[in-house]
Image (tube, grey):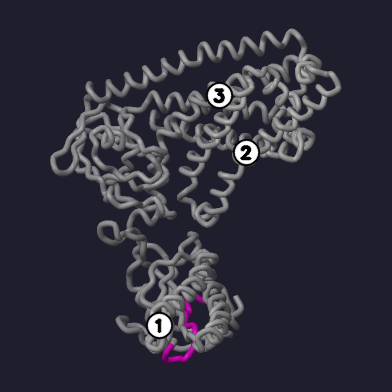
Amino acid sequence: MREDLNSLLRRTRIVSGFILFFYAATHLLNHSLATFSISTADAAREYFIAFWRNPAAEIFLFASFALHILLGIQAVLRRKSFKMTKREWLQMTFPFVALLALIPHILTTAILSRVFAVTDNYELIFAATLVDPAKASSNVIFFSLMVVLIWTHGVIGIHGLLQTKPLYARLRQTIIGFYWAVPTLALVGFFSGLKEMSFITYAHSQLHEDYYMMTLLMKAIPQEAFPVAMMIEMMTRSYYPLALLAIICLAIGNVVRARYFGRVTVSYPNGKTVKVSGGTTILEASRIGGIPHQSVCGGKGRCTTCRVRIISSDGQLPSPNAHEIKAIERVGIDDDMRLACQLRPKQNLSVAPLLNPENSLAGITSARALTGKEQQTVILFVDIREFTKIAEHKLPFDVVYILNKYYAVCGEIIEANGGRLDKFIGDGIMAIFDNTSDIHQNCFNAVEAASKISKSMAELNAELKSDFDEEMRFGMGIHAGETIVGMMGYGKTVSETAVGDNVNVAARLEELTKSYKCQLVISKYVAEKAKIDIKQFTKDLVKIRGRSEKLEILYLENASTLTV
């Protein structure tokens, strides 16, 4: 029951985080419009207010804010160690610092607009920021820090949650650009608005209206509202640091209790042991004991890199929670394997981390790649014909230039069509299409990529003919079937790849393009799964080296003519 509750709390934290992140993004983008003028930002604010200040949205927003803070405090107080990555430290500390400015900002705005019916537009906000020269600089600094810290906290959370998703990986550069653009544009808009307000104030001073900003505030805000706003700021500055100090003391106390009053012994290979309090995760135990332990997602149950094999246990272990069950169903890990970030033992046990902590796996975008698994995979091989003869008559730098142009043409098309470059083998390329769980779509993507490669290679050949008086002939082979996909290699040279008989078949089909003097050979199985018209191809039944049964294949002289 407790594990289910933990999963529910984490899910609540994620959902509330998404709502707050969406609010922050729209709010900051509204700020950015002050770059053009204050009136432009206020015009866009009408739509912002219409959406976020309707009763339903307000309930979701304030509930998300309260829940996210409470769950964040709970997560800090549950920590058994402060040994964290830099990213985890930033994500944990930034919001607590930002709340010093965020709490009075939210409470003052909410009370003035709801209780005193104040129209809290941008003109009023900029005037309030600058009206007191003694506080203007600190107000600007607090606002800027609040934007940077809160946005960074949100970005770290969103990135950690979505980094293993294929769509996120494909749009990674665009999304990262968005992460940088929003706070930058917001701050530019904020400073532009301040500059415009200063200019307007100066213009009014030339007309002998020396207290323009104060007059603006006095007209917009009822006199009885000023003491309330001042009290909110005073109480936040006085009591929030005390509350924060209390949280820090409780967190330190919990860490000390876990470190020196442990009741559970976790044993690792080579005789290493760590004593922790009951309820500490295995991943936290590893960090407490200074034992290297891989965890790409930061211990949030969003990958399987922290998984361990249970060697022995003094009693029955807690059942897998929702996060572990999801991982088990997706990647099919064995029953004696558990996620170290989710398992909270209450008895002594012995474990063995399964992934080499010295290898960086942060770039992997498929959760299935983190554990070897048999699955349906589509393989594409591309190879240049007689490239050695071409290279014999060229300078080394020219050869490198030609190869890189060829790699770029093929690589861009493969990735744009849902594939990933597995390896370069001399002048050959192996690509894997497993972006989706749908074998039909993966086959279609591979065939479409082959057709586009043929078209782009024709353009590249025209360029090379002009520059080097050479043309590259090439062949492609596509096959699909069960393969073993996982992390393979040694030391730092580890990568996600596929192996098995069907990979060899795809390579053999590429070799057959020499015999058939064509650009593309695919298995009939691939054509059927891709649902393409096989009348475009010539059929044959061939003996594949290493296989006893013959294979039905389809070949096409010019793949650029293929209609998919």
What segment carries the magenta color? 514-529
Helix, strand, or loop for circle 2? Answer: helix
**Quarter of the figure with residue 117:** top right
Q: Nearer the viewer, mark 3 or mark 1?
A: 1
Residue that badge 3 annotates:
66
Give coordinates of residue 14: x percent, y percent.
51, 36
- Residue type (three-letter) at the residue carrying disc 3: Ala
Marks 2 and 1, Cα distance to the nearest angstrom?
A: 53 Å
Which of the pair 550/138 is nearer the observer? 138
Residue drawn 31% across and 59% down?
A: 494
- Residue type (three-letter) at the residue carrying disc 2: Ala
Q: Please tell me whether residue 109 is drawn above or below residue 542 in the rendered image.
A: above
Residue 305 colored magenta?
no
- Dot 3 or dot 1: first in sequence order is 3
Which of the pair 89/397 is nearer the observer? 397
Q: Is residue 357 left or right of residue 138?
A: left
Residue drawn 64% across and 36% down?
A: 28
Marks 3 and 1, Cα distance to the nearest angstrom?
A: 67 Å
Point out which mark residue 25 bears: 2
- Dot 2 or dot 1: first in sequence order is 2
Q: Is residue 523 visible?
A: no
Q: Residues within 10 Å of mark 1 (few under 14, many from 20)?
A: few
Point out which mark residue 395 bears: 1
- Residue type (three-letter) at the residue carrying disc 1: Leu
